[in-house]
Image (cartoon, grey):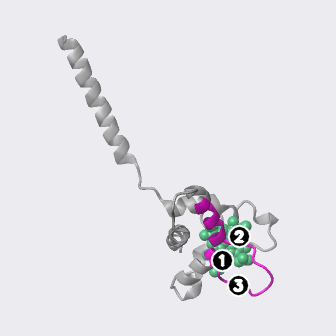
Amino acid sequence: MKTSTLIAIVALNVTTSSHAQSFFRSQAPVDFGKNEFKTNCAACHGLEGKGNGPIVDLMKKPPPDLTLLARSNKGILPIEKIYNTIAGDVPQAHGGRDMPVWGNIYKIEAANYYMDVPYDAEAYVRAKILYLTEYISRLQR
Ligand code: HEC
């Protein structure tokens, strides 16, 4: 092999591998809670959870400000209530609820995702809701 070809190959290797390294180094860890919130919740609750999503005008009552959940509970995030509200286990005081029942939606999503592979629907639903609850904890002010 000619020396110039060898140098070219080595040079190419060095540039691609340093590119690859900086590419992987620049990859932030995937934020599952944020992604899920963006996909399924932000339309109503707004990207920052303040209750100002783009479809609020179409709703009977605006969604609550999720960034104040801890503050309005003596500074303690009501994790269980949040979890159960998302799952759909909390009955509303008056009339029906305006928020979709995510526990059921995620069960259907799991069935579509795994098709005929054995899976645990409860675990799938729990993981989704825990991601979301953790994300909501980060939105508190
Ligand atoms: C269609 C609009 C809509 C969507 C989409 C929606 N919500 Fe809601 N959410 C509401 C409304 C309205 C309420 C107030 C309770 C009610 O009327 O059902 C609420 C209440 C809540 C509460 C309870 C807040 C409190 O004051 O205790 C939490 C937590 C919550 N939503 C989280 C979520 C999460 C997480 C998602 C996405 C998986 C989501 N919501 C998607 C409309 C929505």
Would you say 17 lies left or right of 85 here?
Answer: left
* Disc 3 from disc 1: Cα separation: 8 Å
* Dot 2 alpha-carbon crowd within 10 angstroms: few under 14, some 14 to 19, many 20 or more: some
Q: Are marks 2 and 1 in contact (CB under 8 Å)?
A: yes
Q: Whole-percent x and y of residue 138?
A: 50, 70
Q: Residue furthest top?
A: 2
In the image, residue 21 lies at what x, y percent? Answer: 31, 41
Q: Amino acid at mark 2?
A: Pro
Q: Check residue 100 for magenta coloring.
A: yes
Residues shaded magenta: 85-111
Of 92 and 120, the residue lying toward us: 120
Q: Around disc 1, counting alpha carbons within 10 Å, would you say few (fewer than 14), some (14 to 19), or many (20 or more)?
A: some
When the figure is inspected, residue 14 is found, relative to residue 96, above or below; the finding is above
- Mark 3 residue type: Pro
Residue at figure coordinates x 58%, y 62% from the top left: 110
Magenta-drawn stretch contains 88: yes
Q: In the rendering, at what x and y percent does residue 92 appear?
A: 73, 84
C-beta proximity under 8 Å, tags 2 and 3: no
Give the labeled residue for mark 1: 88
Is the C-beta of the residue carrying label 2 under 8 Å from the nearest atom of ligand 1?
yes
Q: Which residue matches tag 3?
A: 91
For the residues labelled 2 and 3, the Cα–Cα distance comes to: 12 Å
Quadrant assignment for ligand 1: bottom right
Mark 1 secondary-structure assignment: loop
